[in-house]
Amino acid sequence: MRILTTDHLFAWNRLEDCPSLAVIKQMLDLIPDGPLLKALRDCRGHGRNDCPVHVAWRTHLVRYMLRHPTMDAALAELQRNPALREVVGLEVGMKVPQAWNMSRFLETLGRPEHLALMSDMFEQMARNLALAVPELGCNLAGDSSALSARGDRDATKTSLPQPDGAKKQYLDDKGNVVRIFEWFGYKFHLLVDVKHEVVLAFEVTPATTADCSVIPSLLKKSDRVLPLGRVKTLAYDKAADGGDVHRLLSQACIKPLIEIRNQWKDQTEQLLPGHDGNSNVVHDEAGTIYCYDNVSLTPVKHKMGFMGYEKSRGTLKYRCPARHEGWPCPSDKKCNGNSCYGKTVRVKCKLDLRRFPPIPRGTQEFEKRYDGRTAVERANARLKLFWGADDGNVTGAARFHAHLHTILLVHIGFATLLAGAPRYEGRSLSPVRLSVITKRLQEAHHSE
């Protein structure tokens, strides 16, 4: 990977379709797999050791690093590439693992105790990355994605959840169904850094699991990875619009960027709580505040000027739109009187956390920050298309979970390599000096 000084810190576009042997070796050495290998050796016991555990594990990882669609393709490359065999630990005279060896290894890797160790490895690498990059995780985006899978013939063999069927409907602005998507498998829930597109927490659930029910678990996992108080905002689609989610985010001092679900059927606006009909202040379903000009023959509704969130009071401050924007209003004398600043309205967020978040919907800040949610969609596409998380050829819950956990390890490993890689000036062959982030990552790696 040749990364220029003008590239982003995590230059995902610089990932190679076929990494060099040096990158593969660096990646294999980077993953803290000691506890996992010990657990796998203990699980094997004292039987035959024709395929050593470390060889099977490295062969399994190399398949995803080299983006082979099947294990057979990865084994075929090992057969014809002696340098690659040396990297995975195959000494001279040792045979390349058979396909059935790797199939059994994948099923063993999918045991709950081994998956827990792989999750710990992911969190350890993500934690090192978060300590090296101070801004990583400040703004998060979440989403779920459909993954095709095939279940076990005997579901009693494992305690892992089995795949099931689900259906998702897409509606237009009028509430009419325009498209229906059905699949059988799992849901892949992610929390991704908006700026750098690095996955910091993940969860695999059956396809029928609601998105809002997984958010508490994702936030707990992100807390184990990120320093206390690092997360400032969380962007999510309408699937996360629930009272429990908003209360959880409010307790964690995280500002939600969540589109509201349309639940009003016969009305478009309501009087603001605490106001009577003479105050001419209303709000719509999304929580946007308006005032009415009742002096004119035809009442005119204007959007009030948002002046910011007052953290000490827990309120949203709004101002007379005419005074804020500088245009004449027939109701100016009635509303503002002798005040130079104009009429001020404060809305307590605790009145309705769904409708009155610290960053109100309809403001430029909300729209700009909510657009960052596309980062999780790009990360989803990278995992599903670039590394094959959704190939649909994995049978059995244990194999599928091991398959997905491995892809996440490869993802966070390449993220670490991208952040710590030397940078080059244009066509120069000499890299620039090591950055502070590179030094921090090296120190974290050597201290393990």
Image (tube, rainbow, N blue to C red):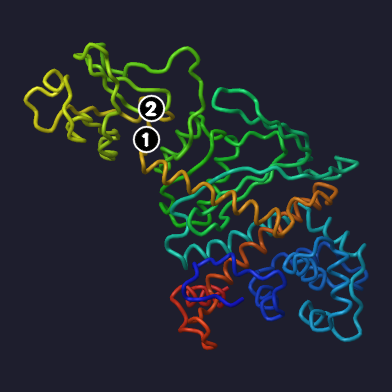
Label 2 packing within 10 angstroms: few (<14), some (14-19), many (20+): many
| Residue behind mark 2 | 287
81 left or right, relative to 390: right
| Residue behind mark 1 | 360
Q: Is residue 49 above or below residue 298?
A: below
Instruction: Quarter of the image for the N terminus: give it.
Output: bottom right
Q: Position of residue 127 (x, y in %)?
A: 53, 62
- The amino acid marked with disc number 1 is Pro
Instruction: Quarter of the image for the C terminus: give it.
Output: bottom right
Q: Position of residue 295 (x, y in %)?
A: 19, 14
373 left or right, relative to 211: left
Q: Is residue 220 above or below residue 290?
A: below
Q: Secondary structure at mark 1?
A: loop
| Residue 207 in which image quadrant | top right
- The amino acid marked with disc number 2 is Gly
Question: Viewer-proximal residue, 196 or 363?
Answer: 363
| Residue 148 in which image quadrant | top right
**Residue placed at 40% from the left, 34% from the top?**
361
Mark before the other along the chain sequence, 1 or 2:
2
Find the distance from the CA under tag 1 to the CA under tag 2.
7 Å
Question: Viewer-proximal residue, 117 or 404?
Answer: 404
Q: Position of residue 3 (x, y in %)?
A: 55, 75
Q: Position of residue 215 (x, y in %)?
A: 56, 40
